[in-house]
Structure formats: C-alpha cells, structure tokens
Amino acid sequence: MSAHAEVRLPQIYSDGMVVQRDRPLHLRGYADPGEEITIKIIKGNKTTVKADADGRWTASLPALKTGRTYTIEAGDKTITNVAVGDVLLCSGQSNMELPVRRVTDMFADEIASYRNSDIRHFIVPKEFDFASERDDVSPSTWKSVDEDAMNFSALAYFTAKALHEKTGLPVGIVNASWGGTPVEAWISEANLSSFPRAINEKLIYSDDSYRDHIKRLESENYSRWNAAMWAGDPGLHSEVKWYAPEFDDSSWIETDLISGTLNDGTDRWSNDGLNPVNGSHWLRKNVELPASMAGKPGVIRLGCIVDADSVYVNGTFVGTTSYQYPPRIYNIPEGVLREGTNNVTVRVISQNGNPHFVAEKPYKIIVGNESINLEGKWRYHLGAPMPQGPAMEFYCYKPAVLYNAMISPVIDYPVAGTVWYQGESNVSRRNEYGALLKTMISNWRDASGDNDMPFYIVELADFLHPSDHEGRAAWAEMRSVQAKVADETPNTTIIRNSDLGEWNDIHPLDKKTLGRRVADAIIK
C-alpha cells in the first residue's frame, strides 16, 4: 500500500518542473494521516516517509544530476519531464508582471524565432487571502518558452535566456507578481508586527462580508456612473452617430492630438481651465490613404491614452482598452480602409485624471510597409462631462494578503535566488520603504529555510517628464533607498536600471538589457 498511497501534491510539484541544481530534492504533499508514501526517482534513489497527524508529509532526496530529465513517483502520483538547472523566484509589481507580448515593439523578431524547451515558468495565480497563509495555489502548470512565450514575464524571459546562454542549463521561473501592489502586501502578518499602520489597514478589511459589501456597492456605483455617461453622451444618441464617417464635424473645435491645445484660445480639451474634465471626449480626424492601402487589413497605433478609449475606423469599431498603460494596437479588418478620405474617431473616457494622448508614442495607420501619420490636428467635442469616477478598493494592495496567497505556497521551493522589481507603488511612502523591504527579505529567507538566499533588487527605471522636478526627485530618492537596502543587507544586489527608463512610460520596453544585467549578477 505504501508504494501506491493516494497523495496530493501542491501545484508547483508537477510535470515539467525545474528543480534547483546542487540542492537536495525537496518534495511535500498530503495523504491520509499516518499513511506511508514512497518517493522514487525512476532509475534512481527512493525514500519512504509518513504523513503526520494532519496528513502532511515532506521528503528530501539527494540532488539530481544536471543534463537529463527525470520522472518522479510519489505514491500514486507521477511527475514527468523534471529538469535540473537554476530556478528563480521573480516577484514584484507590473514591471515584473509585464508579459513578453507587451515588448514586441522592440523584440518581435527575436521572440518569434527563439525556441527553448529548457526555459520554463510557473505562474502563481493572482489571488489574495486575508485569513491565513496558504500551502498551495489554485491550478497552474509549468510551461516552456515553446508553449507559452508571450505570457512569460518579459524580464524573467530575458533573464532566463541570458542565464541559459551562460550555463547551458535549464532555467525555471516561479513568477509571483501583481501590478500596482505595494511591498507590504508581500510580507507576512507576523513580520509586519513593527508596522502597526499596515496591521490595522489589513484589520479594517479582514471581514469577508464587509469586503463583499464594498464590492457590491462599487459595482452599483460604476454601473450608475457609466449609465449616466452613456445616457448623457450625444455622440451615441444623435441621428448620425459621432463615429460615423459621414458625420459633419465642421463645427467642432480643432486641437493638437498630443499637446491637447485648442485653437480657440482656451487651454486644453482635457480641462476646464482649472480642473480636469472627466467623462467622455470625442476626437475625429480625416486622413488620405493611397490606393495601395485600400481594402487591405491594417493596424492602427494610438500610442497610450489616459484613461480608456474606443476606436472606430470609417465607422467600424476596431478596439477598446479600459486603462491607460497598454499600447493601443488595434487590427483594422480587410475592406474597411479605402482610397482617399478615411475617418478615425476616438472616444476617450476619463474617470479620475487628466485625459490625454501620451507623447512620443506611435500614432499611425499601418498597412504592410506603408504607414500614415495620425499626429497633428484633430477635431474635438466634449461628450458627457462627469464627476470623478467612483473610488475602488484593491484588496490585493492590502498588507500580508499576497504573502498569504502567492508566496507562502511556493516559498519553500528551492531557488538560486529572488529577483524583485517593485517600488513604484511605494514612492509616496519611500521614507518607510527601506525598513519594509529589509523585513520582506528577512521574512522570505526565513520562510524558505535558506537564510542566504540571494536577492536581486531591480532599481526603479527613470520616469516622468524632465520638467517634473518634484516627481523625479522622489523617484531618485526611492532609488537611493533601494541601493541602501542592497548595501546594508548581506547577499543582496542592486541591478542598475535607471538608464533604461522612458520618461513617458512607467513600463520601459528594454527588458532585454535589464535581463542580461540580472543574469550577469547571478553568474558572477
């Protein structure tokens, strides 16, 4: 019976996993209390362990040799295609989460041509838990570059690629990241004891019914806000819709797309002279296309827009994006474009900010090797002016909740080190960031059982317009805090990144150079 005990394994212990070289093979799982479980490496070592009174068991076997794949049996479960190499825990906020598909503007050809079944990732599902530290995650699987390249973290992808080039060994990425999250969300509650503000913030939201009530109210608030905007937007209810190519926009005011400056002497369409104007804004432009572009499928690029947009080409809806950061890249179907005059209409939605089109981004229609520039003068009209959009609580931002759901289940999985790219969400509280980050590093090392686990802290990239002296100074101070933590914490390295930033994008594209720097720090 012991050789075939019915067991349950955490998600990370599954087909295709990469285990850390030169470390004992660590496994854990669940069975009936007192059950004996035989762990066997096919054509290798085996051991027998017994589940404790709670049904938990752990096993340790000698390190597996590199250069081959293994099959492991644990009771009645079999794990196939197990590789041995270097494993990295990659965590943080959106610059770590940012997938490969978002950097194809810079690396499309390289990504399309690269194949490597020895580079694999395990994406920890995005979940939070206010109640307790979990011992497993929701269903997830190991996938290789060959299977899932576009969903790899771009930084992890290029780090793994550079590591593989240096060592020739498999590389496993455990990706536990979530955009916008502050550092305190990634620290256990016990380790936050010296940060009472964080503990009390978590306490406010710890009741499930209270959180559910907030979300129900938020849903109603947003539903009412959007319904009012829709009802009050004449562009959607006029006899000829404002996105129709035949609509007469000759009475609309002209504006420059990027600067937003209006030609009637007022300031910008995005504000009323004092405050930003929330709600819907309509912009239209007629462009001339040659016969060589007519009828063919194309792509419209509209940079980045604050906040949301819906885009129409010759009256055909071609795409929408609900928030500001993703690049606007929409496919234009075959037959939509025509020779001569073509209309582009953008309906911009602003909820809580200063609506605008981000400068120094691509704005064009592309067909094959031909393109038409869309910058310059557009026609503008206000749709439905609105109050600020309803506030929203992001529970994933609350202290300890991501440690509970996303780190606790995987922190005992042996790794060569942790790559940490986070801090943008803590810039406004940079005076406490150093203490929090040191606490997190100590927390993770202790929980992993590896008190010397290397940490690689990615320096925040340069950001904000050169004229924003106050904002840029704050980011510079944050980088200094990061460097100080690395300097004062053993086996912790700062990875230079400020020079790779883009002033107009909090998500700089060059994750390849950054990935090489991380790999260089790992393989010194």
Image (cartoon, grey):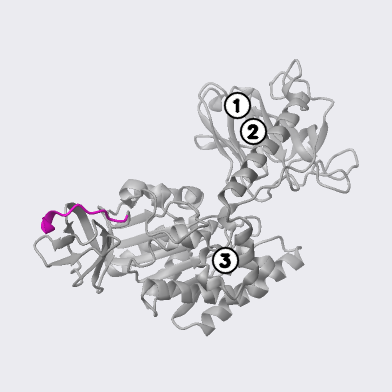
Magenta extent: 1-10
Q: Earlier in the sequence, mark 1 or mark 2?
A: 2
Residue at 61 percent of width and 38 percent of height: 364
Image coords of residue 68 (percent x, y): 17, 62
The answer to which of 459 and 44 lies nearer the viewer is 44
**Mark 2 residue element:** strand
Which residue occupies 59% across, 59% down?
A: 398
> Mark 1 or mark 3, which has the lower sequence index?
3
With 227 as the anchor, is 140 left or right in this view? left
User: In the rendered structure, which disc, 2 or 3, sits on the residue that comes first in sequence?
Assistant: 3
* Residue at figure coordinates x 80%, y 40% from the top left: 387
Q: Is residue 145 visible?
A: yes
- Give the residue at x 61% y 40%: 322
The image shows residue 148, relative to residue 285, as above or below, that is below
How many C-alpha atoms fall within 10 Å of the one at disc 3: few (<14), some, or many (≥20)? many
> Between marks 1 and 3, how big is the CA–CA gap?
42 Å
Kindly indicate whether the residue at mark 3 contacts the one at mark 2 (C-beta within 8 angstroms): no
The N terminus lies in quadrant:
bottom left
| Element under disc 1 | strand
Nearest to the observer: residue 367 or residue 490: 490
Residue that badge 3 annotates? 184
- The reply, left or right, for residue 142 in relation to residue 510 is left
Q: Which residue is mark 1?
A: 317
**Residue nearer the viewer, 92 or 474:** 92
Examine the structure image and report whether residue 2 is included in the region drawn in magenta: yes
Question: Residue 460: horizontal and vertical position, in percent?
Answer: 58, 67
Q: In which quadrant of the rendered view does residue 243 lie? A: top right
Residue 180 visible in the picture: no
